[in-house]
Amino acid sequence: EITKEQRALIKAILDAYNRHQIPQDVTKKLLQEQYSAEENFLLLTEVATSQVQVLVEFTKNIPGFLSLDREDQIALLKGSAVEAMFLRSAQVLSKKMPSGHIEVLEERIRKSGMSEEFMTPMFNFYKSIGELHMTQEEQAILTTITILTPDRPYVKSHEAVERLQETMLEVLRKLCVLQHPQEPQYFARLLGRLTELRTLHHYHAEMLTSWKTNDHKFTPLLCEIWDVQ
Ligand SMILES: CC(C)c1onc(-c2c(Cl)cccc2Cl)c1COc1ccc(-c2ccc3c(C(=O)O)c[nH]c3c2)cc1
């Protein structure tokens, strides 16, 4: 069913996904620092910045990514960063982590000066990801598929990206059949999450604007990847 090449692909992606993680000293801060809207925003900004650095390193390990046009590589990273971070934070929130972590992260996101209207869709997404009980491989490959989305702004060689994404979609389809035999619709449900991610991406652009109007500062890396300021 899964070919030797596809197995190698899964291994390469999973290794990269597990190798590139936010350093403990950054995520530990989420547990330690005190609570205030300002402090929460600062902490989330620090974690997001670290997550983007991790994302860039992970992306370099996606087979075929570095042979894409250089400008397309940047366009894919800029276009997928928010969605990859929604996926990553969703996986963290649904992991059976030491209980402190989960409430703390959720609490800090809820109290970071974000307007109420984004909370509902965001936490519905977190809940829907949690209910899927994705395996590590599925999480890593779904993140890869999100990054390899051909119709991001400014992508020139659409076909080259589409070919890479299709390869990963086929791998994910086979994995879902193997790992969730009792749920024939599981693969379709995973792809449905990608649609939800696009909606959250739009909400996020508005979140950035409202944070900016309240004079919130971002790091240079976030400003660059999100075209703010
Ligand atoms: C600039 C700030 C204010 C911002 O703007 N939009 C969003 C934002 C929000 Cl508020 C929600 C979704 C996506 C984004 Cl970009 C954010 C905060 O983004 C993140 C990104 C990533 C984590 C995150 C990742 C990994 C782990 C982890 C582990 O690996 O062990 C343990 N704890 C983790 C935490 C949290 C928050």
Image (cartoon, rainbow, N blue to C red):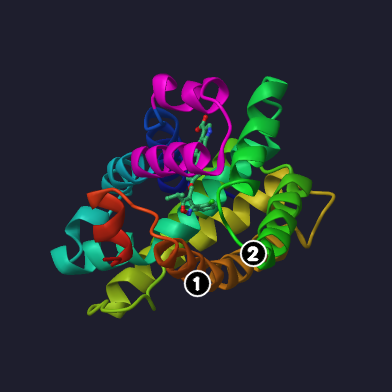
Residue drawn at x 71%, y 27% is: 96
Residue drawn at x 62%, y 46% is: 111
Q: Which residue is the site of mark 1?
A: 206
Point out the tag, 1 or 2, that comes first from the N-terminus: 2
Which amino acid type is shown beneath numbered disc 1?
Glu
Report whether 229 appears left or right of 117.
left
Numbered circles on residues, count: 2
Report whether 224 appears left or right of 164.
left
Residue drawn at x 53%, y 28% is: 30
Image-quadrant location for residue 116: bottom right
Q: Which residue is the site of mark 2?
A: 118
The magenta stretch spans which residues? 23-50
Q: Is 19 above or below relative to 45?
A: above
Pick the front one: 214 or 65: 214
Q: Where is residue 68 in the image (x, y as percent from the top left)?
A: 20, 63
Report whether 132 appears left or right of 138.
right
Answer yes or no: disc 1 within 8 Å of ligand 1: no
Q: Judging from the image, what secondary structure is the residue with disc 1 in?
A: helix
Asked if the residues shown at circle 1 and circle 2 are in contact, with their CB atoms under 8 angstroms apart, the answer is: yes
Which amino acid type is shown beneath numbered disc 2?
Phe
Q: In which quarter of the image is the C terminus?
A: bottom left
Q: Would you call the spot at circle 1 few (<14 residues within 10 Å), some (14-19), or many (20 or more)? A: some
Judge whether residue 33 is colored magenta: yes
